[in-house]
Image (spheres, coloured by chain):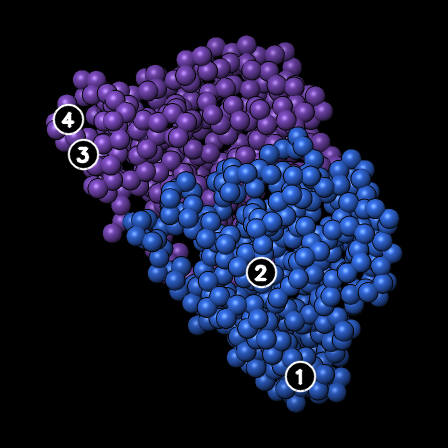
Chain colours: A purple, B blue
């Protein structure tokens, strides 16, 4: 029996996609073999990967100045690749720190020899909000931010409009969940395991001319040009993960694209936040209202014991993956694209019941 | 209809494994979700990954001094990680060059600042054999080799016994195809897409004390200790690929382990090489007899036109993936673990027919 899956990542995938993957496991696309057994140089696989790039560009309305790359190593490898390519050897980059993943990103940049300037941080307030005042340095190479914060349940509404350098973003946990204006950006990346597909694939959006400004002489697998110049096939890419991603992208398109997906995610978020806000303090959202994430809804109960009971009972009702990140505890419901309104209403129904019994 | 798949990689997987993957796609291990939807921190996933490590160690008889790591980025990223960790900043390493992949490995080491010494190379003879005479430097940090050469169809029989430093090997294309004595090694790695599973996973065997000698201060995802200290879960690993690998390892075990697999691969190789050698020169093996690979059997026909005809007709008979590497042309039949004796005999049957018609 399928459960309602509120995992923060890896996370729920559309059941239609999983069914198609299963049905094609022994014979993909008439090749007489699994997608995993096909050569990455086979015409059909090259075409599939190229189509997947085009799907991303079309969903995000990206112009021909953008390329879509398929990398590996997750956001954590991007935390190193970005500074190694674009602010190496003591060059300056500005970071906006909104929680665990942006903290890791700027620490890794330091490790890579970048001079890091924190233009803003909500650390002093437990990362409960997205800063709107920035103290940018005069001429950084780029300004880095994390569009959605899975741990603290916050999400950017409007990206900085007046930054002194192009923006770079980790979009991992709200990629393709809403329309997004990337015109001030030069690079954005997303680990696949939230809204895209299986872990082991990182989708990188990069402006072609910006890629050319990267440091020369890096190890090939750390140089964005290696991916750009070889259609992400300098070596064997994670073909299966790209294939699943292609099915997810087609599913998004069939649902109506990002405009429809965004409305759908707004409804899910409203449903859950309304349940929290209408509980007279029995459930307490942790993020400031203006910074609330539609992807990861974080809240607390009156005590840790009650939270434990909540999570255990939820699980017996088939509501899984609701534990907060191990660094902060509490409850977290991740509402990625593949999480249905039915799943959210099952959760809010359970929350009402639980409050009645324990309130 | 399933074809006979002679791809060099990604390559054939055991049909039993694919069937199990398909059957568990909507509900893995009673979790009510796909393996791709499970958190990598979930107990069952952590247990699965730990079990997979143990399977590798048990198949290879590795003692407790070894660790098994799950990395990403393929052999190409290892080409950089090995020198960055173990021969950085102009330190010396010896390489034995037996073809494309070892050439790439030493070139990447140079790119990473390693002082490279070629202890042997068969480049002058078109990489048709594995060298047995070595001109080692006096005190390199390690000696690097490629155990099997997919492009040229050669394979090591006996690794250097008298090297001046511990050995490091790229085992990608014959990993778990035979018993192997790793006692003189400190590190060996294998891209999964030959004998292990889907592309996007690299299995790394490393001696724990050797890992500790690596350069400090590298980007986290390039430091072997990051994987060692976190059970390969510093960040989200490629869970699906690890899961498929675990099923393949169990399949190898159920077949009887490496001793049985090795005999099975010897029989397949003999069947095909006998067909080549018994063709009175119609088919000509490209590798020297003492260096022939049991994994990738490379041969030529009398002309490129005839090779083209051979490949086209083979495909119509359901014999696929037989084209030689794009850098050398000709014919290549890859006989990885999951390629059956039936497949090989279908190929040799076709070869006899083709010779009769075109000889």
Vertical arrangement, residue A205 with respect to residue A100, above or below: below
Marks 3/2 in contact by CB < 8 Å: the verdict is: no
Q: Position of residue A61 (x, y in %)?
A: 47, 35
For mark 2, name the chain: B
Element marked by disc 3 = helix
Labels 2 and 4 within one chain: no
Q: Nearer the viewer, residue A178 or B328?
A: B328
What residue is shown with label 2?
Answer: B60
Element marked by disc 4 = helix
Disc 3 residue crowd, few under 14, some 14–19, many 20+, Cα 10 Å: some
Where residue A134 is drawn, which disc sits there? Answer: none
What residue is shown with label 3?
Answer: A350
Labels 3 and 4 within one chain: yes
Q: Nearer the viewer, mark 2 or mark 4?
A: 2
Q: Nearer the viewer, residue A199 or B355?
A: A199
What residue is shown with label 4?
Answer: A358
- Residue, x 21% and y 17% (percent of image)? A281
Labels 1 and 2 within one chain: yes
Where residue B275 is drawn, which disc sits there? Answer: 1
For mark 3, name the chain: A
Q: Quadrant of residue A73?
A: top right
């Amino acid at each position: 029996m399928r459960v309602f899956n509120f995992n923060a990542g890896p996370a729920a995938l559309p059941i239609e996609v999983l069914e198609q993957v299963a049905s094609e496991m022994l014979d993909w696309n008439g090749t007489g073999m699994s997608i995993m057994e096909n050569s990455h140089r086979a015409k059909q696989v090259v075409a599939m990967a190229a189509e997947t790039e085009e799907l991303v560009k079309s969903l995000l309305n990206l112009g021909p100045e953008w390329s879509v790359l398929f990398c590996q190593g997750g956001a954590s490898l991007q935390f190193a690749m970005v500074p190694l390519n674009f602010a190496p050897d003591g060059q300056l980059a500005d970071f906006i720190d909104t929680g665990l993943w942006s903290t890791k990103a700027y620490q890794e940049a330091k490790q890579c020899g970048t001079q890091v300037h924190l233009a803003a941080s909500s650390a002093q307030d437990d990362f409960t909000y997205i800063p709107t005042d920035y103290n940018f340095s005069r001429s950084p190479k780029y300004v880095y931010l994390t569009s959605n914060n899975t741990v603290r349940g916050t999400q950017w509404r409007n990206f900085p409009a007046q930054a002194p350098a192009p923006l770079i973003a980790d979009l991992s946990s709200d990629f393709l969940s809403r329309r997004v204006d990337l015109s001030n950006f030069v690079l954005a990346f997303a680990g696949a395991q939230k809204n895209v597909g299986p872990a082991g694939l990182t989708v990188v959006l990069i402006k072609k001319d910006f890629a050319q400004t990267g440091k020369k002489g890096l190890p090939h697998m750390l140089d964005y040009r290696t991916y750009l110049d070889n259609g992400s096939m300098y070596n064997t890419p994670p073909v299966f993960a790209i294939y699943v991603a292609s099915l997810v992208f087609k599913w998004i398109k069939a649902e109506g694209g990002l405009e429809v997906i965004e409305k759908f995610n707004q409804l899910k978020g409203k449903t859950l936040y309304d349940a929290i806000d209408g509980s007279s303090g029995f459930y307490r959202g942790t993020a400031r209202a203006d910074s609330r994430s539609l992807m990861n809804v974080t809240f607390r109960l009156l005590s840790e014991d009650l939270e434990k009971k909540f999570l255990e009972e939820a699980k017996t009702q088939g509501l899984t993956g609701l534990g907060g990140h191990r660094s902060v505890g509490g409850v977290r419901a991740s509402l990625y694209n593949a999480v249905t309104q039915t799943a959210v209403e099952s959760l809010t129904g359970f929350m009402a019941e639980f409050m009645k019994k324990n309130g």
